[in-house]
Image (cartoon, grey):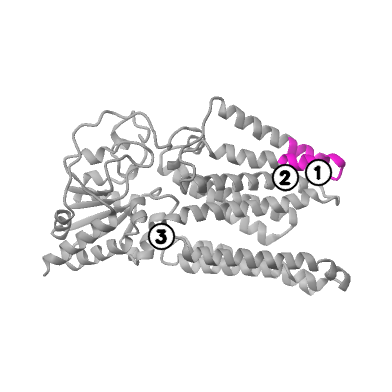
Amino acid sequence: MLAQHLTGLSGLVAAALFIFGLKRMASPASALSGIVLAGVGMVVAVAASFLILFDLDVAARDHLATNLALALVALALGGGWAWRRGGKVEMTAMPQMVALYNGMGGGAAAAIAAAGLAGQETTGPLLLAVTVIGALIGSISLTGSVIAWAKLDGRIAKPWRFAGQRLVNATVFVATVLVGAAAVALHGGPDGAWLAGLFFVGALAFGILMTLPIGGADMPVVISLYNAFTGLAVGLEGFALQNPALMIAGMVVGSAGTLLTLLMAKAMNRSLANVLFSNFGDGAASGGAAVHGEMKASDAGDAAIAMRYASSVIIIPGYGLAVAQAQQKLYELVKLLQAAEVDVKFAIHPVAGRMPGHMNVLLAEAGVPYDIIFDMDEVNADFPNTDVALVIGANDVVNPAARTDKSSPIYGMPILDADKARQVYVIKRGQGKGYSGVENLLFFEENCSMVYGDAQAVLTRMVQAVKDLGA
């Protein structure tokens, strides 16, 4: 009885740590401590699951010995792999890792449901129905996240589409739901087991079919959506198991993921349905007005001198900065400019990079102070009074076509108003289009100059040029 009370108390402590940890993650300054607190909560929740052994007699403990050994092996393997990979993962691979972890959470919820459906013990129809719903959502999150990982990692280069795809997807989904309902109705009977197996095949297949047509530019929203799916699946399985810690953790993750997904879709001025069912974001977007003018190349040293003698500079980081691993060199440049009394700010678009908060994490890794990092809504009004805007590896988030060209696929999407600065320098490898395949009108503006090259190499030359001025 004591162990049962301790288990309940542990669940309450774990849930409080989850909630408080998530609250701390709302600010970059406290995000690290929030992650640690949530991690401690997870350790408490896992440890509490072993307390049930103290309420069992000797025979029951022996019966559970094999399961206990398997659980410890799983903890060692999972914890060891995560510790090793988490310490080695590069910033450019962070979105892929997040996608995989999302999928593993959904897969774990589906596995719990599979164990429940495979059992022959009598279970109420409500709990069985909740179990099946959690299994459906968790399975979709698992395979969908794996496809998202493959897209982000370059293993799937293009969206996979065919005529009548939406009808096929809808048919698979409806059939899977009907099979799941039949598995609940026939649970415990000879037909229940194979129906449950068929249900999981359909659910896993739908996660693949749902994600394959979505273009790469929409992956940040997709990752966030599957994060919400995983949380919802975990919460539902927690309800089926009558486990308060799982329920609370799942609801917190699910609600946070849902809000983030909606905010990101809003930042792109698109509905979630448009993200999931349109053909945008495949690297070959069509539409857009004819481009006038030409790109003007500039030397890295000239751009650096312009920033050194400017009064204000706003820097807009993008995925190209992460690819070049140039965040440390960028911060070195920033410190030189600040020493020359230049007002330097960073402007972050909600969907910059390949996952939510990607650029914030990148800058935090370099030690950039939080008080000079601003979100789009906080900094956009400053661009008209800014001497120089420096764009590094970003594209769609600074494309004026979103404001002016009604034929553009990104029309209406809120952007950073870099083009309104007095002078714009863009560090870019070449003249190619961005991840969405939309031509960027900013690059052809009179006040814009292109600095071609790898961001690490270009920023190194800029740093040296500024240092030479002080020699």
The dot on residue 193 is 1
- What range is drawn magenta here? 179-199
Is residue 161 shown above or below 469? above
Q: Quadrant of the C terminus?
A: bottom left
**What residue type is disc 3 on?**
Val
Amino acid carrying mark 2 in the image = Val
Verify whether residue 176 appears in magenta: no
Residue shown at the point (45%, 52%) measured from the top left? 356
Q: What SS does tag 2 mark?
A: helix
C-beta proximity under 8 Å, tags 1 and 2? no
Q: CA distance from mark 3 to mark 2?
A: 37 Å
Q: Circle 3 is placed at which residue position?
A: 361
Question: Tag 2 or tag 3, which sits nearer the N-term?
Answer: 2
Residue 33 can be seen, yes or no: yes
Amino acid identity at mark 1 = Ala
Q: Identify the residue shown where x is 42% and y is 58%.
A: 91
